[in-house]
Amino acid sequence: MKNYFLNYFYTFIYLILVLLSYPHSSHATDPIKIENMCFDNTLIWSTINLASELSWSAEKSEGFRSQLKGVLGKAPKILPFTERFSVLIDGDWKHSAGVYFPNDADPHGHPQVRIRPQTLLERDYGSKVIFHEWIHLLHQSIAPKEDSWIREGVALISEFENFNELSPTWRAALSTPETSLISAIDPEKIDFTQNPQVSPQYGHWLQFFFYLKKACAIPNMLQWMLPDTTEILAGIPGLDQRIRKTFKELNSPTSKCQDFETVFRAFQHARFFPEYASEDGYLNISPYTVAIRKTPMVLPPYSAMAYKLDKDTQPVCEKGDETVLGQYCLRIKTE
């Protein structure tokens, strides 16, 4: 009898753990396939009634379907990714315009991304959000252990590569430039629509990968991130590996594309003082400039800040900080 109850208890615990391991597979409302928005290997599902909640029409469905088909056609053709892929218009998701969770699947088991219903109301924006999340899905399939900050940077720069437009988060990172490059943001724990730190963080990732793309002459970032037999590392070690390999291929001794730390430091010089580092290939977006502080501040890992010299309060840069243009100090923190 004792063994019977123990087996029952262990079975119960096992089932609970299984359910917890798939937190994104259940819905208050079962998703319904929106047939007139599906195309090729892409299926569109919704947990809400689009007609009643978004005043959706057949004309809007056709327009969105056509737009999304064109957008996904811009994705890099680098993978044997032929299985079906789904977009879930998720009435329960509130934290951001869209999201991708590894192992998230539609009712048939196909990989899927999620978007808020309101994201559909701006057709061009909605298509870009889905493209961004689809890049996450592709990246996950080739590098499942990659750090989240690198995933976001790759998705953001992929948007730029395919639409020739920089995300508005770029400007947020100019006014709040001291975020950590390697910071992780959990979309389930943070409401992206309410947290003021999210946009500067995304902007920092975008700026870094924009600089990396220019410094290392990378035509397609996701393709560049494809691992080969020698590139099995994730995070900074993996990036360092790729940069070193690219530096050898560039055969340009003056290039800043030497290793991760060289790129990181050159990037910080360039974004705080573009006139000082223009030769590094960093494109300053006029008329916006990065915020320069009046006093130094404590920094998190892999971040930077600049402050002004003042003959009365700050006549010289603090130890370890670099004097720039005779009137500023640049503080760069790595580990």
Image: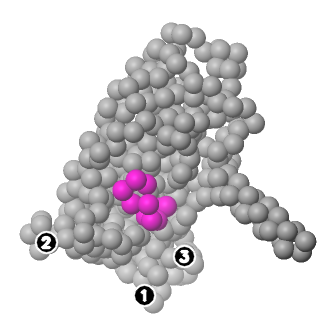
Count of all numbered marks drawn on residues in the image:
3
In the rendering, which numbered label is found on residue 320?
1
Graded by Cα atoms within 10 Å as few (under 14), some (14 to 19) or many (20 or more), the crowding at tag 1 reads few
* Element type where label 3 sits in the image: loop
Classify 19 as above or below 41.
below
* Element type where label 2 sits in the image: helix
181 relative position to 89: left or right: left
Q: Which residues are magenta?
A: 140-150
Residue annotated with mark 3: 299
Front residue (pair 87, 25): 25
Query: Label 2 amino acid?
Result: Lys
Front residue (pair 335, 222): 222
Measure the C-alpha gap from mark 2 to mark 3: 33 Å
Quick one: label 1 or label 2, which is nearer the N terminus?
Answer: 2
Graded by Cα atoms within 10 Å as few (under 14), some (14 to 19) or many (20 or more), the crowding at tag 2 reads few
Which quarter of the figure has residue 7?
Answer: bottom right
Residue drawn 90% across and 71% down? 1
Classify 197 as above or below 88.
below
72 relative position to 86: left or right: left
Query: Label 3 amino acid?
Result: Leu
Q: Nearer the viewer, mark 2 or mark 3?
A: 2
Label 1 close to label 2 by CB (< 8 Å): no
Measure the C-alpha gap from mark 1 to mark 3: 13 Å
203 relative position to 260: left or right: right
Residue drawn 73% across and 63% down? 14
* Element type where label 1 sits in the image: loop
